[in-house]
Image (spheres, rainbow, N blue to C red):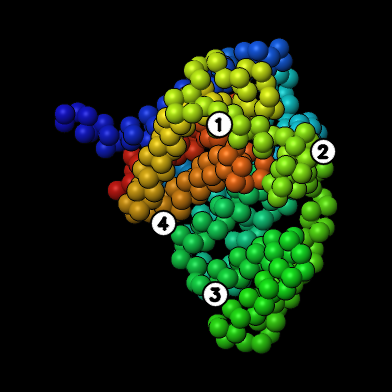
Amino acid sequence: MRINYKLNDRFDLTIFLSASLLVIIGLFAIYSSTQNTITQKGNFDKQLISWGISLFLLFFIYALPTKFLKLTAVPTYALSILLLLVVLVIGRKVGGARSWIAFGGFSFQPAEFAKLATLLYLSHFLSRDETDLDNLKDIFIALAIGLTPIALIMLEPDLGSSFVFIGIILALLFWKGISLFGLAVVLSPGIVAVASLFGPIYFAVAVGFVIVILFFFKKDIFLSGSILALNIASGFFVDNFYNILSPHQQTRIRAFIDPNADPLGSGYNAIQAKVAIGSGGLFGKGFLHGNQTQLQFIPEQWTDFIFCVVGEEFGFIGSLVVIVLFLVLFLRILRLASFAKNEFLSMVIIGILTVFFVHFLVNIGMAIGILPVIGIPLPFVSYGGSSLLINMAMLGIILNIHRSRKEST
């Protein structure tokens, strides 16, 4: 009993086992969803190999000195920006986005690496003693750190990954303790931009809401006018942002608004996904017995729509198991963030938690039809070597911080 206590004090078994069970469930789902395909039949073997490599990476990172994380924050971020530039030149197009770099038989998605690099560097900047989020200059520097990779990723274009970066920025600013005014400055342009997509009336209401907020905070006229101008500009330029999206991403957004408007086209994935999950019932149709899964009605069901495989073949109970495992993982990581004495490490934990949570929320949300289909994998479960490697690397960082959580430096 004492040995087990000492082990868990140095290594969080709950976090490790929760993630491992999710990987195992994912392997079953990947095998089931690809066994009847010719081109994707080897995905199970590839994912199994990726898991073995990622376990080695996890324990390697776990064994590193914790201070190594802060030392590598800046060079890692610089490398990620370089890779995002390289992929725009020599990247391979997949699903309408030039987002992959191929090395022989191995493919790597720089956006996955950039998520980790960005949260490390942003945590490093925000945890400095001289950083003050009551100072708009520091807020804009923090936004620049997060928005630079977003700008490069949107050139690919990859809308799904961009949402993850936005989540990282907001979560770290909140955890740092940004003021209500600072939070309003950060959030309002996005709210106005989204409102403008629904028409001029919504745009006008959103701008009016911003004016009320600025009046409430009673800042000087120049600052208030600049923020108002920024919000109005974000609304006017949202059409340009929409136009740079690839055609398939535009149709996905339209399909979210009304999937039944084009059931055989842009709304097909959303409709079939809900059919698959709904047909699973309480206990599911059984492993390898899902009609939607085995007849390949859902495109990319081994990646973006893998939750549909779980829902159809393992039913409500299987889906609930996946969700509970994620919740256990999230709560353990959040608990560690609250106990970590070092501010930088605490922010790194929150950044990693945000990456996992946004992926979880968006992936399952689009599978059940409450969020647009933007192409984002389910952590540890979906097929994808580079995604699994980065997720396990982030888990290694979490376990590393758990080991040294009582240290203040």
Label 3 residue SS: helix
Do the residues under discs 2 and 4 have CB atoms within 8 angstroms? no
Q: Secondary structure at mark 2?
A: helix
Q: Determine the CA span between mark 2 and mark 1.
A: 39 Å
Q: Residue at x 63, y 38 (%)?
A: 376
Identity of the amino acid at label 3? Phe
In the rendered image, residue 17, in percent from the top left (x then y), is placed at 37, 29
Disc number at residue 181?
3
Q: Nearer the viewer, mark 3 or mark 2?
A: 3
Which type of secondary structure does the marked residue at label 1 adopt?
helix
Q: Which residue is mark 4?
A: 343
Residue 289: give x, y in percent of width and height.
Answer: 55, 15
In this figure, which residue is indicated by the disc labeled 2?
Answer: 89
The mark that comes first in sequence, 2 or 4, is: 2
* 160 relative to 180 in the view: left or right: right
Mark yes or no: residue 115 visible.
no
Circle 1 is placed at which residue position?
Answer: 277
Query: Sequence-wise, which precedes: disc 3 or disc 4?
Result: 3
Q: Is residue 100 visible?
A: yes
**Kind of residue sitting beneath label 1:** Ile
